[in-house]
């Protein structure tokens, strides 16, 4: 490459990758993150012709141009000094503009931020008109100083902005207030939270909870204390407790739990007292529902009673389609044909004739008024998930009720499920 200065027009015609290669060949550092115009300036400064060290001083006729260049260099030097506020912190651009608008005096170096935003064309014009250059060694140092301004600006953006933003929150006037968070800022926010937490009484005493166990495939689960759906008062059951007491999904568990910690969503189960109404100490090994032997129905459930001979629905079912223990049946009918009435008759007849049988009425995707009517008619348990609930909730409630019935059968009880949906 020639020792003379490169033509600026030739450099501008090249792309950024070619300019980076030229700058690397010339030994220019800190050019990787610079813009194209900055790389061109670095190359021009690096390849500029150097004046002899013993060069004679400029003639007297050029004093005017030298003095003008000196004044311009002094203005540039003064523009690089940061503008400081009353608290000794650097002011931002909007604070400088506000002070000028209100007529507030600012330090003579208050133009640093605004002066740095001048166009590159003004800098080039100043470089062309500033007269003879200093010796080459000084130019090299000046180039390094100018190049180092880039990393310093990055540091100002990374670290300085955080400090300025923090100080700005403290001295920002009401008109420029950040309205995204009107609460405590910075350390004050955590102090207020600690004060609120310290004022609240903390009760770590164990409390008694009871509910149905919703066990996950991973081994842990949650004790649903408010029906079959998740609620705020549910207790977390660890894998250790499920293995220790051989807990299964759908078990009705009673035990002690501790309150939830600061970073916990649910309370934690500490101990198990009863499982399906039986004390844990008296609990015997129970078979799995999958291991039980399925048999044909051999014991009939009669719906008609001598005390109510007018119940023709129950009498017709006993004659035409009798129901037995272990039987599965389905009622098929068009809408508004009396299907719900038949189901209520079956439920009330089983409750009267066989009080030892556990009756569960499961209503899925039904109207809320039908759920209310069924609860007023049947004394047994009515579980519902109305039509305004999501389908995932319908599935979850139905599965948990089926698992509960399996656990009751494993304990030797008779269970009847009437499903309407």
Image (spheres, rainbow, N blue to C red):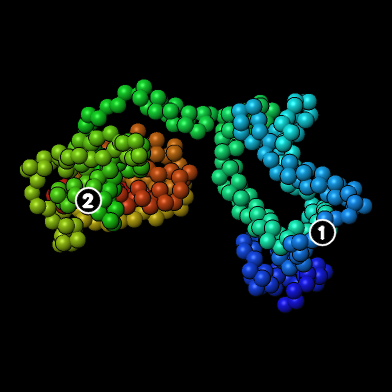
Numbered mark located on residue 265 in the image: none
- Residue 308 image point, x, y percent: 25, 37
Please name the residue shown 44% across and 39% down the image.
Answer: 368
Tell me which corner region of the image, top left, top right, bottom left or bottom right, holds residue 252.
top left
Asked whether 50 or 22 is in front, the reply is 50
Residue 270 visible? The answer is yes
Please name the residue shown 35% across and 39% down the image.
Answer: 263
| Disc 2 secondary structure class | helix
Which image quadrant: the N terminus? bottom right
* Residue located beneath label 1 in the image: 56
* Residue located beneath label 2 in the image: 239
Against 83, residue 5 (above or below) is below
The residue lying furthest to the right in this view is 61
- Residue 353 image point, x, y percent: 20, 41
The residue lying furthest to the bottom in this view is 1
Left or right, residue 361 beside residue 112: left
- Residue 155 image point, x, y percent: 58, 49
């Amino acid at each position: 490459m020639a020792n003379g200065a490169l033509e600026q027009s030739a450099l501008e015609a090249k792309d950024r990758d070619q300019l980076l290669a030229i700058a690397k060949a010339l030994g220019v550092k800190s050019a990787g993150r610079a813009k194209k115009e900055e790389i061109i300036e670095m190359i021009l400064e690096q390849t500029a012709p150097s004046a002899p060290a013993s060069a004679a001083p400029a003639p007297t006729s050029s004093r005017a141009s030298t003095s003008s260049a000196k004044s311009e260099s002094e203005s540039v030097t003064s523009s690089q000094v940061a503008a400081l506020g009353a608290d000794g912190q650097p002011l931002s651009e909007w604070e400088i503009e506000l002070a000028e608008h209100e007529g507030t005096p600012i330090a003579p170096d208050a133009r640093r931020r605004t002066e740095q935003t001048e166009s590159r064309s003004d800098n080039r014009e100043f470089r062309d008109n500033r007269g003879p250059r200093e010796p080459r060694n000084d130019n090299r140092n000046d180039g390094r100083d100018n190049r180092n301004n880039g990393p310093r600006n990055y540091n100002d953006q990374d670290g300085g902005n955080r400090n300025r933003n923090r100080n700005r929150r403290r001295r920002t006037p009401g008109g420029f207030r950040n309205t995204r968070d009107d609460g405590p800022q910075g350390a004050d926010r955590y102090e207020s939270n600690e004060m609120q937490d310290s004022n609240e009484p903390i009760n770590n005493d164990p409390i008694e909870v009871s509910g149905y166990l919703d066990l996950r495939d991973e081994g842990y689960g949650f004790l649903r204390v408010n029906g079959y759906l998740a609620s705020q008062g549910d207790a977390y059951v660890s894998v250790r407790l499920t293995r220790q007491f051989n807990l299964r999904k759908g078990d009705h568990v009673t035990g002690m739990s501790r309150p939830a910690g600061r970073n916990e969503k649910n309370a934690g189960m500490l101990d198990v007292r009863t499982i399906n109404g039986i004390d844990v100490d008296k609990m015997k090994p129970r078979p799995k529902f999958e291991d039980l032997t399925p048999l044909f129905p051999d014991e009939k459930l009669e719906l008609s009673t001598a005390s109510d001979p007018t119940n023709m629905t129950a009498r017709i079912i006993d004659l035409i389609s009798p129901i037995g223990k272990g039987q599965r049946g389905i009622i098929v009918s068009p809408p508004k044909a009396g299907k719900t009435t038949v189901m209520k008759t079956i439920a009330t007849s089983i409750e009267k004739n066989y009080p030892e049988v556990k009756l569960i009425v499961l209503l899925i995707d039904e109207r809320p008024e039908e759920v209310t009517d069924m609860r007023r008619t049947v004394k047994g348990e009515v579980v519902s998930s109305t039509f305004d609930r999501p389908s995932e909730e319908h599935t979850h409630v139905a599965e948990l009720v089926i698992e509960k019935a399996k656990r009751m059968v494993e304990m030797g009880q008779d269970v009847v499920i009437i499903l309407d949906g």
